[in-house]
Amino acid sequence: MERTQRWLCSPAFRGFLALGIVLLTAACDSGSTIATSKLSQLVLTEQDMPGFTAFSKGPQVRLDNQGTVRADASRYGREGGWIIRLHPADSTKTAGPLVVESRADLFKTSDGAKSDFAAYRVLFSRLSGEHKEVAISGLGQDAVGVTFTQPGGRTLRFFRIAWRSQNATASITVEGFDGQVSQDDALALAHQQEKRIEGA
Amino acid sequence: MKSGDQSRVVRRRVGLLAAITAVAGFVLSGGGSAYAYPGLFEDDESTVMSGALDMRDVSAGTTLTECPQAGLTGNGAQPLNSHQQDNAERKSTGSDRRLNQDFSCMPQDETVVDQNPKASGNYIAGANDYRLGWGTSGFYSTTDKGAHWYDGITPFPSLPSGQNLDGGGDPVVVFDRAGVAYYAQINFNRTDDTSGVWVNRSTNGGFTWTRPCVAIRLAAPPSEAAACGGPGDVRQPGDGTVGFIQDNDKILNGSVPAFDKEWITAGPRPTGVHATCFTPLTHTPTACNPAVIGSDRLYVTYSLFSGAGSAQIFLSYSDDQARSWSTPQFIGGAAAFCAAGGRAGNSCADNQGTQPTVNPTTGQLWVGFINGDTVDEDQYLVVTSRDGGQTFSPPSRVDTLYDVNLPRGVNGRADCVARGQGSTRAVPTNSCFRYDPIFNSIVADKRGGEFANSVYVALVDNRNGTIRDSNTDVFLYKSTDGGLTWIGPTRVNNDRSTTPPNRDCGRRTNSIGGTSASCPEQNWGADQFFPFVTISTEGMLNVTFHDRRLDTSSPVGSGAWPTSKTEVGNYLVWYWGAQCKITHAVTVSQTTTGPVPAGASECTAPEAVVNPTVVTGFDPGAGPVPGQNQNSATLPFRNFQISDVGSNFDYTFRAGIFAGDYSGNSSGPVVAGATGNNGDEAGNGERGSHDVIAVWTDARNGRGSGAPTSFQPGRNPICEQSDVFFKFYNGQNGGEGARGREGDSLNGFLVAPCGGDMRDPGN
């Protein structure tokens, strides 16, 4: 028993363990890459969000990343991006998400996606005002989320979640009136999008 | 256009290092529960490209459905409209008339207009026109003073490859004194970086236009043998081509400089300056064909965005009716007040929004432009030429342009970013359309004698607002010594405009970034924007602008985008005018500041000063500056409403994020004593010799995208559109008074959903 304990605590074992984790992670990461032809399937659709209508969808354009660290359309071997923006069909609706943006970017390799995910972290760190990180689990290989408010006659609440899945990065932005939209709303949409990515 | 003291390349390198550091810090810290990093990139890309270029890769739509057609009159062919008129369309029955005659249901914006000095009933307007499904340059012509209009898209320039460059925008029209019309614009490929500046020509009042061509070289240098196209192409090689750069990698990645924001004017060649023409390839001076020498010299100015991130400004001129053009000349000059740009010799080389103007009596030329070679706030500069654009004075500084404290995504307007707006683009409170003050306006007096050195500038900025609550005002400056000494600012709009105690609250020092939550919520006043100034031959200054003052009660959380409507009122948009007459000019020439001499106070606010910049210095900080706290009751410009109804700019292009970078323009009368046709179909009464025409972008025919709907990838929601409207008003005693008021517009336009019978069900 003692020998086993010593072995488990030895630097050699910890080295093997670390190597194993790295290899396991690499194995997970080096799975099949998502083809560019699937790009449009990697974002939410109106079918995913009953009662919502898209007011913009298609390939990402320069304006979608203007003024941010993700502005270079050819960054990290990027092969393309897709985006959809939705809002409730009923403009008098005040509860729940009122504007939702879902986007995805594909890269030649998962390393490119990792770099882009790191850029997401920077982007979130630069958002105006005070932000709070939200815990994200079980979403892709890396995930980060923040929430913040925007002052006004009625305070707005935003959730932004970004994650990496193989050679793709994806993100969700959810906006609504403070107290009327929740982290769960945003997480549910993110997981719904991730299902699309996993199925692509 | 905030710019630091480093080149963009350097800033990017520093930014990259900072980004790595920030990422490392963020990751290593595990992510704080609450965190804020100082801004590092916020200023990047803040030299604002025109919307036409900025959105060149945005698809406009597929034009499959019908839509409201309010304001369209005349006896042209009419469609079989099957949609039910809604409340908004029924309310749009005032005297405003629509210029664009198309039924495409697509946007038109960025409007300009000019009157033919040889035929007073002949006007030509221009606009960005998306009727084909992407941005092009539309023309709209009348020969009966607006009773009927003919319209279309200007011919695309032809390239040596045989291609036609079909993306266009930034339209400007001008007549020369002989009545020949010119249409300047940028054209570009939508999928790569190929772009240029071209001028179309019309000799029949704007109904037929030339197709510009980039000369095809036919022999090795130094031969100038060239052609426009194949055998039988009669065009002069290079006709209409001011500048052109072909992309080098066929990718839209900024690998070559981009042409942007050109403007054109025409004026007599100054005494001693003779007509000069140029070869098509090297622009070498050559003899002119006497048959095509124009009555005026044409001047085109434009910005050229370089890979270094700044935009230099250039000028070319033409004496042969736009057939050949002089070698582009950098005109930004150099000055101590551009030292913060960090360029050799204090070059003023981070510019945008040039506008040339000529005194038609003397031929002296002035060019105004915004400059970002500053520590913090931008500045508005003017250069002048007395020799027909061959040499220029160093720039003079009109005033600081207080535009870095405008609301933007990077300082708190996340709602606009979520709707698709660029994060550094300026937006007004309650709305998300970009309204960076790229284009201001400058006009030379038309008279000689004591007025020969008088020039007027209309600027718009947010010195009376904050990053949380915009309150942009229009200010007039005048110079009576040829542009060296400036008197102002004089607030042109005379509605309530209070001054915040700290206009920079929430904004980070020397940055457009910030946190609007740090700024107290307050409605300081309504926004005015997109100003344009003209002057009649009798000295009447006519300023026109968009104005939100009449909307005082639209509720928070209302409108097409409830999450963006955060303040009561200040939402719907009308078109307004303001007038003041200059009857005499007293030369004021000094380098110091001080009160305005009594003889020079015409059309100036009592609070205006000589050389306002000297009062504040070049980096004014957040303290009081001229133009704040001016008493509305004692302002010299009489204001009047032009458009009938309030328009909802949330129903312009792409979720209300673009309504043009300038809008509205006025013209006339250009010939003293000229009379036009009597009366018009709008019932405005007999048209007199003092009539001014105003044109503007108006979204009264726009509707929400509605639901349920499914549309093709990238298309504009089918019901979003804006149109070009016009109205004549008395240029001496302006305006016909308010016709439609706030209540009418709130009921009709605050929320105007897309009718079920106008929607495309998609697939």
Image: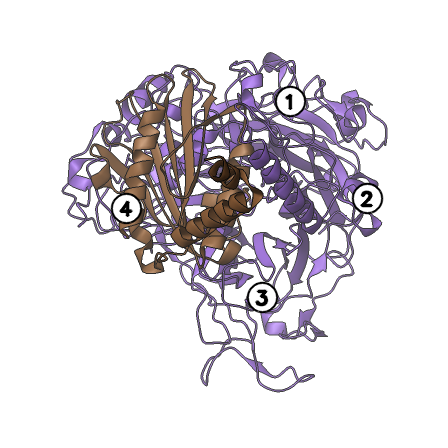
Mark 4 crowdedness (10 Å alpha carbons): few <14, some 14-19, many ≥20? some
Nearer the observer, B376 or B239: B376
Real-space Cα separation, disc 3 to disc 1, in angstroms: 40 Å
Residue type at mark 3 is: Ile
Q: Determine which quarter of the picture holds residue B580.
A: top right
Say which chain tag 1 marks. Answer: B
Nearer the observer, A90 or B122: A90
Residue type at mark 2 is: Ala
Mark 2 crowdedness (10 Å alpha carbons): few <14, some 14-19, many ≥20? some
Instruction: Please state the horizontal and vertical placement of residue B231, each as a whole percent of the image.
Output: 46, 85
At 69% from the left edge and 76% from the top edge, which residue is drawn? B287
Q: Is residue B560 visible?
A: no
Secondary element under disc 2, as helix, strand or loop, is loop
- Residue identified by numbered label 3: B245
Residue type at mark 4 is: Arg
Nearer the observer, B504 or B615: B504
Real-space Cα separation, disc 4 to disc 1, in angstroms: 45 Å
- Residue identified by numbered label 2: B335
